[in-house]
Image (cartoon, rainbow, N blue to C red):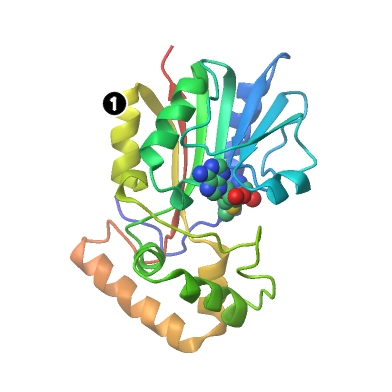
Amino acid sequence: MSVPRDPATVENAIALARPLVTAALAGGGRSVLEAGCGSCSHFDLAGAHSVGIDISASQLERNSSLDERLEGDLQFHDLGCERFDAVVSWYVLEHVARPDLALANMARALRPGGILVLAVPRVLSVKGLVTKFSPHWFHVAVYRHLLGRKTAGLEGHPPFPTHLRWSMSAAGLRRFAREEGFDTELWEIFEDDTQRRLRARFIPFRLAFALLDLVVRLLTLTRASAYPTDLLTILRKQG
Ligand SMILES: C[S@@+](CC[C@H](N)C(=O)[O-])C[C@H]1O[C@@H](n2cnc3c(N)ncnc32)[C@H](O)[C@@H]1O
């Protein structure tokens, strides 16, 4: 299968995920965990009991959509066993030193038949590799000077320190799903808005990506592209 020329966006991916999240939380008495909730949610969780965990007290305080707030580390905090119908972890695994522990913790907290929604940067992408092998001050500089975010690097504001361990790469997540007994319901790769905007704004960036994409397509016989940066997957815990 060859990849389309125009990489999908996060909006495309969310549109595909939304019906699955809605269905998992339909029917009353449902509960959802926002793992690394930050200050907002990307899905309509109304009607479900929503619990958020975050390591940052200031992020938790800013989140007004939660019924219950837990200040703690997703890798180690006791989330209980088979308690949630859905666990949503939106751009969090790249920030933890042991994503394998966080994944195991979330898997344990899910009821059989429940869904795990994961949005992550792809480690094996141009953005992923540059981020993984560059220091945090460089990420702050990009946010401040290229993206114009004045609060970049201040406490409780992105970019957050990033590890991007191989255990949360696409291959790592597939292995996790296999070993922990999850079925894959959605597996969608897309290009994030930041890279899209940088390509639109800076001609050298655009040209470099076009060239890189050509090379990647040739080397993989059009099975891969240099553009997609991120992955949204929904995994269902087997009953
Ligand atoms: C990029 S933000 C994403 C926040 C939110 N999920 C969103 O999409 O807007 C990453 C969040 O993960 C939280 N975080 C980082 N490491 C964590 C950990 N070990 N345990 C729990 N939360 C963590 C950060 O405090 C931050 O709120």
| 11 vs 110: above or below | below
Q: Amino acid at mark 1?
A: Glu
Q: For the residue labelled by badge 1, is the local secondary structure a helix, a strand or a loop?
A: helix
Q: Is residue 234 left or right of residue 179?
A: right
| 43 vs 122: above or below | above
In the picture, residue 9 is in which quadrant?
A: bottom right
Residue 13 seen? no
In the picture, residue 145 is in which quadrant?
A: bottom right
Identified at 53% across, 39% down, the residue is: 73
Q: Which residue is mark 1?
A: 179
| 16 vs 163: above or below | above
Q: Position of residue 205 (x, y in %)?
A: 44, 82
Q: Is residue 235 left or right of residue 152?
A: left
Extreme residue in the bottom direction:
204
Q: Position of residue 225 (x, y in %)?
A: 34, 63
Label 1 CB, ligand 1: below 8 Å? Answer: no
Q: Is residue 63 left or right of residue 143?
A: right
Q: Position of residue 210 (x, y in %)?
A: 37, 77
